[in-house]
Amino acid sequence: MSNTKLSQADVARLLANPAPEARAEVAAKLGSDLDNPTLSDAELVLAQEIIRVLAKDVAVTVRETLSHSLRKAQRLPKDIAVQLAKDVEQVSLPVLEDCLVLTDDDLLSLIKDNAASEAKWTAIAKRPAVSTALADALVDKGSEHVVATLVGNRGAQISDEGLIKVVERFGDSAAVQEPLVKRDKLPVTVAEKLVVRVSEKLKEYLVTHHELSPAMAADMILQS
């Protein structure tokens, strides 16, 4: 048996030892253990119940370890994923960035929560895949840093309207301009709005990588 696998001895030690270090050690093992295909139904239920206990632990370090351990677990109970996502930043960020158990509705509710922090929105913007609905919500509410992170994420699907709004809100931001110009695809309408704002180097990139002819770029600059 691998020494990373949660055992009955771990459970006994968890119950007998009130030290946060012992609970954190168990939390660290749960990530690899939860998705183990050899777990019986009874073992899976036991592991999930332990997760529920640890997710309410008073020690932030225990909940943080649990979040890191379970950030990619496919059998993480939905209610615990949401609970961890709503926790303090130290706990929530790994889950917000990687947990596929969280749905768009779960994440949209966090984006719309005015109490949510920039760090949480940035974590959502970094997810391997960001839907159009999530991306447009982040564009509407996110800070310069959040939006720069989003447009630099190749897994983020941003609508044409969302991209135009990015230019309207942060078109003069160097932090946003470069990742925006270097997206794989950029609508001509967005490229036209950017060409009068960006550096010569980025103008050249717009012309060579997007559907913007040198003549069109020159005309836009002269009109500006």
Image: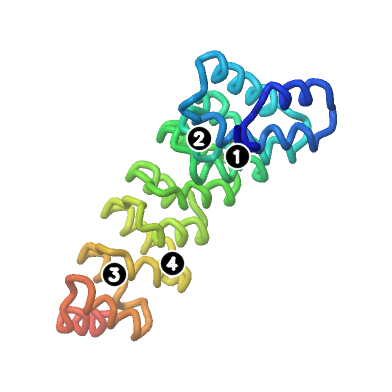
Name the residue carrying label 2: 73
- Amino acid on which the number 3 mark rests in the picture: Lys
**Tag 1's secondary structure?**
helix
Can residue 43 be spotted in the picture?
yes
167 to the left or right of 3: left
- Amino acid on which the number 1 mark rests in the picture: Ser
Name the residue carrying label 4: 176
- Amino acid on which the number 4 mark rests in the picture: Val
- First of labels 1, 3 by sequence position: 1
Given this view, does label 4 or label 3 mark the residue nearer the observer? 4
Neighbour class for label 2 at 10 Å: few (<14), some, many (≥20)?
A: many
What's the residue at 61%, 38% (across, down)? 67
- Rounded to the nearest whole Å, what is the CA distance between mark 1 and mark 3? 44 Å
Given this view, does label 1 or label 3 mark the residue nearer the observer? 1
Between residues 214 and 7, which one lies in front from this camera angle?
A: 7
What's the residue at 39%, 43% (across, down)? 134
The image position of residue 142, as x and y in percent, is 49, 52
Can residue 86 be spotted in the picture?
no
Name the residue carrying label 3: 193
- Is residue 89 placed above or below 2 in the rendered structure? below
View extreme (front): residue: 1
Circles 1, 3 touching at the beta carbon (< 8 Å): no
Name the residue carrying label 1: 69
Quarter holding the N terminus? top right
